[in-house]
Image (cartoon, grey):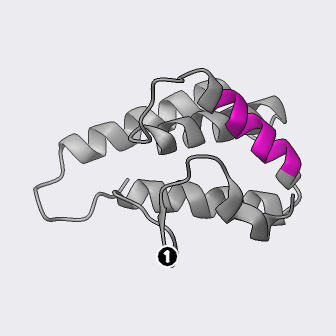
Amino acid sequence: MSAPDVLNLPRLPRDAEGPVFAEPWQAQAFALTLKLHEGGAFTWTEWADALSTELKRDPEDDGSRYYEHWVAALEGLVTGRKLAATDELISRKAAWKNAYLHTPHGRPVEL
């Protein structure tokens, strides 16, 4: 599977024009995955296998948690290839959560 086959991924939320995102972080996770693939961090087959594994762990998901599974698959590949350590990811998530919780409504969240 090549990156252009992204529309063939199972349960990918989409419309007639392509993938749809309910939140900006979903689009960012999507773009980051494509960028890492383009940079040679993993093959598209490896990505599809990782995502498929994550989706199978939650057979009751109606698609509303799709991008949560997406991020879990991406984190697994990134840590498995030692592109980032697990503790670095945890720290970064905590920083973003803190920034989000302390950003006034309507303002962009920044670290």
Image quadrant assignment for residue 69: top right
Image height of 35 relative to 92, above or below: below
Q: Check disc 1 and report its element: helix, strand or loop.
A: loop
Position of residue 22 measured from the top left corner of the image (x, y, whole percent): 34, 57
| Number of numbered discs | 1
Along the viewing direction, whichever of 109 and 26 lies nearer the viewer:
26
**Which sits in the foreground, 62 or 69?**
62
Judged from this view, the residue extending furthest toward the left is: 105
Q: Is residue 23 above or below residue 18?
A: above
Give, as a single range, the part of the protein colored magenta.
45-54
Residue located at (80% from left, 30% from top): 80
Does residue 91 appear to the left or right of 100 in the view shown? right
Query: Which is more toward the observer, 41 or 5?
Result: 5
Kind of residue at badge 1: Ala
Please tell me which residue is depicted at 37% across the width and 43% down the height of the picture. Answer: 96
* Residue at 20 percent of width and 41 percent of height: 101
The residue at 41%/61% (across/down) is 21
10 Å crowding of disc 1: few (<14), some (14-19), many (20+): few
Residue 31 at least partly seen: yes
Badge 1 is on which residue? 16
* Nearer to the camera, 8 or 107: 8
Is 50 covered by the magenta stretch? yes
Is residue 42 at least partly visible in the picture? no
> Residue 31 sits in which quadrant?
bottom right
Main secondary-structure element of the magenta-colored stretch: helix
The percent position of residue 106, horizontal first and vertical second, equals: 13, 64
18 sits left or right of 46 in the view:
left
Residue 44: horizontal and vertical position, in percent? 84, 54
Q: Is residue 79 magenta?
A: no
- 17 is higher (above) or lower (below) than 48: below
